[in-house]
Amino acid sequence: MLLRKGDEAAFEKIYHLYSQRLMGNLVKLLKSEELAAELLQETFVKIWNHRSQIDAAKSFRSYLFRIAENLVYDFFRKASRDKKLQQQLLAGATAHYRHVEESVCNKENAYRLKRAIEALPPQRRQVFQLIKLEGRSYAEVSNALNISVSTISDHIVKATRFIRKELGSEQAVAVSILAVILFS
């Protein structure tokens, strides 16, 4: 094995072969890309420093992942003694949870908005989509659909009222924002 002899090219090859998979595994365990990147580097430093002890008869991949896993365990043992690190981990986990929760809520709200828009009468839905979702002017829509600007205005008022009713008053403000997110 070239790595055991100190061949840097072999080490680079091993790094490129395993680093992405190992990084993904570390991120799952640590819930932090920054910490995972640190431990990834530390793992490969250990591999390099202990290269003469590598047993060529055994699985290198298992050896590599075991070293990384042990570093994670050491990290959590240290974190249990270090209050500042505990707070940092808790803040990271909380931010991750909030991000997931917000994502779920946004998807649910987008789905409800889409259903409300689909429930509009066909012409009102078309007018609403052209004005609110595509950002066209009343005059453009009037010319395109061959209906008056006052009819366009009436459709928008009624569509907005209907959607607010469907979504509930607490979400009425979010209608425009969600529409932009949903259809952009």
Image: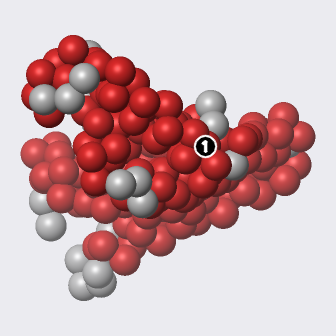
Residue plotted at (68% across, 57% down): 74
Q: Which quadrant would residue 85 be assigned to in this image?
A: top right
Where does residue 155 sit, x and y in percent of width and height? 39, 35
Residue plotted at (29% across, 73% down): 60
Residue to which mark 1 is pinned: 164
Residue 78 visible, this angle: yes
Q: Which quadrant would residue 30 be assigned to in this image?
A: bottom right
Q: Few, some or many C-alpha atoms within 10 Å of disc 1 (few <14, some 14-19, many ≥20)?
A: some
Q: Secondary structure at mark 1?
A: helix
Residue plotted at (30% across, 73% down): 61
Q: State left or right for residue 166 relative to residue 181.
A: right
Count of labels in the image: 1
Name the image quarter holding the C terminus: top left
Foreground pick, 8 / 121: 121
Residue 41 visible, this angle: no
Foreground pick, 184 / 120: 120
